[in-house]
Image: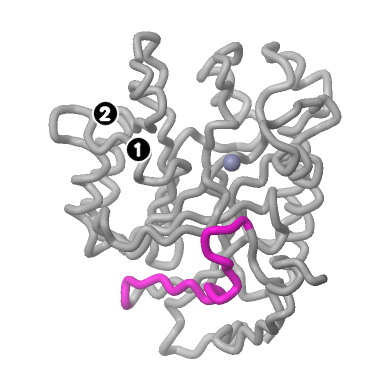
Amino acid sequence: MMNRRQFSTMGLITAASLALSRGATAANAKKFHFAVVSDPHVIDEFYHGQESNAEDTESLHQANARLTAARDTINSIPAIEQVFVPGDVFHNYPSPEYDFYFQNKTRIDNAKEIFAGFKAPVHLGFGNHDYDHSRAVSREMSERLFMEKLKTKPYYAVDYKGFRFLHLNNFQGKTWDPSLSASDAKLGFLGEEQLNWAEAQLAERKPTLVFVHYPLRIVAPTEVKDYGLYPMLQKYKENIPLVLTGHVHKWIDEGTKYGPHHIIAAATRYDQNSWMILEADAKQGTVKWLDEDRAEWDTHYAHPYQKA
Ligand SMILES: [Zn+2]
């Protein structure tokens, strides 16, 4: 008997809407394509963990291969000019010692190697597994390792062809406060410094796509009095065509309840087909998700990409 997964991958994806030709005409010179690859959770030979269920554990053992397979497919699409990763680049820390990461080939090196194999530039963001939940690895050490090995700052902007991409980091501010309440410990915080920086970026009113690891539903709405990410997104929603997050590992459309359209992306960790191709149009200030039909909503899965 055919299971749901086999059945769902039988649907032929024609991807006819993907006019991924290299020769852009003058009219669409400001349009470009980019890919989003979320929650790869790269591991190494030091990973011996048991996750909370068999599927989660199995998915980690497949994580590197699935990211590599996703990369190879994305590399076969010449129109893709940039790649963004909204966090959980690798999965936890095998050692609390900084030197360990320079004496051994770890998941951070494996991530670096796989991402270096993308033809397009890759822009990484931080997820909860890129920090150490047990706090044995400090925030400073995680950020130092990211800088040293992955050339990635805790949060930053990428400007490309009239478009702006913000990689926000929801593990700043109150996140590291030792007196954090149990309910606040479940929330993401940007911290005042990053909020100020984000506001300055948005105030320029360029078309801006916002990446955060945590879905907005678990990001603190406000952090300093009435100042926070929610009111900021409302204030600048005309210039934010999309907010993309990860963490849940399933395709979820949150609609426009936070102001801009908000989509939660599934993870390559569970399915090598779960990544996105988007088209940015700086002139119109819009972003179109071109292969949306591949997503199997509310699941880890996506139909395979097929060339138009
Ligand atoms: Zn994740």
Of marks 2 and 1, which one's residue comes earlier in the chain?
2
Q: Mark 1 points at which residue?
A: 219
Q: Is residue 215 left or right of residue 241?
A: right
Quarter of the rendered image showing ligand 1? top right
* 103 to the left or right of 268: right
- Give 30 or 240, whichever is nearer the viewer: 240
Image quadrant for the N terminus? bottom right
Callout 2 touching callout 1 (CB < 8 Å): no
The reply to whether the magenta stretch includes residue 52 is no
Between marks 2 and 1 in the image, the one whose residue lies nearer the viewer: 1
Q: In this view, does 275 lie above or below 58?
A: below
Q: Mark 2 points at which residue?
A: 192
Q: Residues within 10 Å of mark 2 (few under 14, many from 20)?
A: some
Dot 1 amino acid type: Val
Give the residue drawn at x 60%, y 82%.
20
In magenta segment, residue 292:
yes
**Quadrant in the picture for the C terminus:** bottom right
> Whole-percent x and y of residue 171?
43, 29
Q: Identify the residue at the far left of this view.
A: 226
Magenta range is 284-300
* Rendered residue at 55%/14% (across/down): 135
**Residue 277: percent from the left, percent from the top?**
56, 69
Q: Residue at x 46, y 50 (%)?
A: 245
Left or right of 119 in this view: 278? left
Residue 87 vs 99, above or below: the answer is below
Identify the disc placed on residue 150. none
**Whole-percent x and y of residue 19?**
57, 86
Name the residue type under label 2: Glu
Q: How far apart are marks 2 and 1 (CA)?
A: 14 Å
Q: Identify whether 20 is placed above or below 273.
A: below
